[in-house]
Image (cartoon, rainbow, N blue to C red):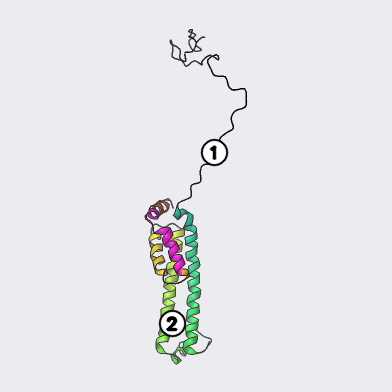
């Protein structure tokens, strides 16, 4: 056998030339012969992609939580308007046109019930605003969105059944310590 780089003679079975150090292919006599039959079948795992690894909790549920806060805000608007309408009907004993601008009619009912209407309206406006801001902050991945969502979720736990369900779901997604680390990574990317 002869070295292809320098032309020096090489002893059979040697992998490198003693003169120049070039790698030399072994002679065909010393290489194992491939089997005459076809190769073994490929392992089953080679046919499949990488094993399934689920996305982390916040990434999986972030879109759903933020959209549900918007839906909950719309529900709160409807609930507040219905509550004010029925309170007005209860205090005045009629469904008169001009409501809610006709405050003279409220004088026929108990005075303390008439004072509840602005409280219900203010409470509805504040809860709707908090729900919309929580949904928006989660959807746009604001750094303070997780904290606000946890606070609003705790406040909404008292509004059974929808507020309770959404509060529990939001706390399940956002409250764990692992979710805090994941949220920080998501907020930094956004």
Whole-angstrom CA distance, mark 1 to mark 2, is 67 Å
Query: Percent from the top left, x then y, of residue 156?
Result: 42, 69
* 74 part of magenta stretch: no
Question: In front of the other: label 1 or label 2?
Answer: 1
Query: Percent from the top left, x then y, of residue 77?
Result: 49, 73
* 171 part of magenta stretch: yes
Q: Using the image, determine if residue 4 lies above or below residue 116.
A: above
What is the crowding at mark 1: few (fewer than 14 residues within 10 Å), some, or many (at least 20)?
few
Q: Using the image, determine if residue 171 lies above or below residue 94.
A: above
According to the picture, the residue beneath numbered tag 2 turns out to be 117
Q: Using the image, determine if residue 91 lies above or below residue 176.
A: below
Query: Percent from the top left, x then y, of residue 181?
Result: 38, 52
Q: Residue at x 46, y 88 (%)?
A: 91
Q: Residue at x 40, y 84 (%)?
A: 115
Q: Secondary structure at mark 2?
A: helix
According to the picture, the residue beneath numbered tag 1 turns out to be 45
The residue nearer to you, when weighing 38 against 75, is 38
Q: Using the image, determine if residue 101 lies above or below residue 39.
A: below
Tag on residue 164? none
What is the crowding at mark 2: few (fewer than 14 residues within 10 Å), some, or many (at least 20)?
some
> Residue pushed farthest bottom?
108
Left or right of residue 146: residue 10: right
Instruction: Look at the numbered discs 1 and 2 and tell me whether their residues touch, using CB distance below 8 Å.
Output: no
> From which residue to which does the magenta span run?
163-180
Q: Residue at x 47, y 61 (%)?
A: 65
User: Residue 101, can we see it?
Assistant: no
């Amino acid at each position: 056998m002869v070295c292809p780089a320098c032309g020096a003679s090489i002893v059979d079975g040697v992998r490198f030339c003693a003169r120049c150090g070039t790698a030399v292919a072994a002679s065909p006599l010393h290489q194992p012969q491939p089997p005459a039959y076809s190769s073994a079948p490929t392992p089953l795992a080679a046919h499949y992609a990488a094993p399934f690894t689920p996305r982390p909790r916040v990434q999986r549920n972030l879109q759903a939580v933020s959209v549900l806060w918007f839906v909950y805000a719309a529900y709160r608007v409807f609930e507040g308007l219905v509550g004010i309408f029925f309170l007005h009907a209860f205090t005045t004993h009629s469904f008169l046109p001009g409501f809610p601008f006709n405050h003279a009619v409220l004088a026929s009912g108990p005075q303390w019930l008439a004072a509840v209407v602005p409280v219900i309206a203010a409470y509805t406006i504040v809860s709707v605003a908090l729900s919309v801001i929580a949904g928006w902050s989660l959807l746009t991945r604001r750094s303070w969105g997780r904290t606000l969502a946890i606070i609003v979720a705790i406040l909404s736990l008292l509004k059974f059944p929808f507020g309770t369900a959404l509060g529990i779901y939001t706390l399940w997604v956002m409250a764990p310590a692992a979710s805090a680390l994941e949220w920080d990574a998501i907020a930094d990317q956004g």
